[in-house]
Image: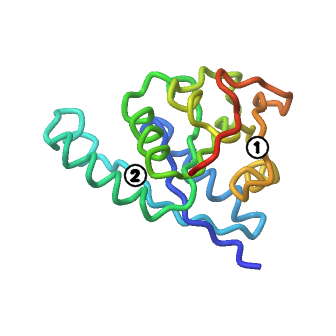
Amino acid sequence: MDNTKNVFISHHHKDDKSVSAFTDLLAGKDYNIRNSSIRVNEKNKERLEKKQIPKKTLERLLSMKMRWAGTVVVLIGTQTHSREWVNWEIDQAAKQGKRIIGVYINGASDSDIPESFEKYGNALVGWKSDRIIGAIDGSINNWETPTGEPREGHWSPYRSTC
């Protein structure tokens, strides 16, 4: 069985270290994550903050990178719900018919969920490798709190792609 998955990891840039921790966590279970999302280096961070990169350019780049992925993983931290780009990425994933899963960042309490994830998310799990793998593979479709307790989504957690 091939344990390599192409994913796009949507996250708040301040949680960038959690992206590496996420891929490392799954690598420890012989699960190879190939991430197509954008990691912000210091030079690009400055350009983004000064709005030197046109919005349309970013949208085109993010859409292309997302098209390559089979699943979109949203890392959910304390500020993720307030990030315009995270909601935009979730909306694009839904338009592209991607499976969208949420993962609470390690140590996060029941952080607020991005509005677009409430609409389109397929599964929401805590920072546990077996739960994350099940959500990516599609065998887990429920919503949980960071501790694994059942959590009701704002909308029905089930959606299908026509």
Q: Is residue 53 above or below residue 138?
A: above
Q: Is residue 146 above or below residue 127?
A: above
24 or 37: nearer the eye? 37
Q: Residue at x 49, y 44 (%)?
A: 94
Q: Are marks 2 and 1 in contact (CB under 8 Å)?
A: no
Question: Hey, which quadrant is residue 65 in on the image?
Answer: bottom left
- As drawn, the label of residue 39 is 2
Residue 123 as seen in the image, left or right of residue 88: right
The image's mark for residue 141 is: 1
| Tag 1: amino acid | Asn
The quadrant holding residue 67 is bottom left
Q: CA distance from mark 2 to mark 1?
A: 28 Å
Residue 48 figure quarter: top left
**Which secondary structure lies at badge 2?**
loop
Q: Residue at the spot x=77%, y=28% of the render?
A: 145
Q: With 51 as the anchor, is 25 left or right in this view? A: right
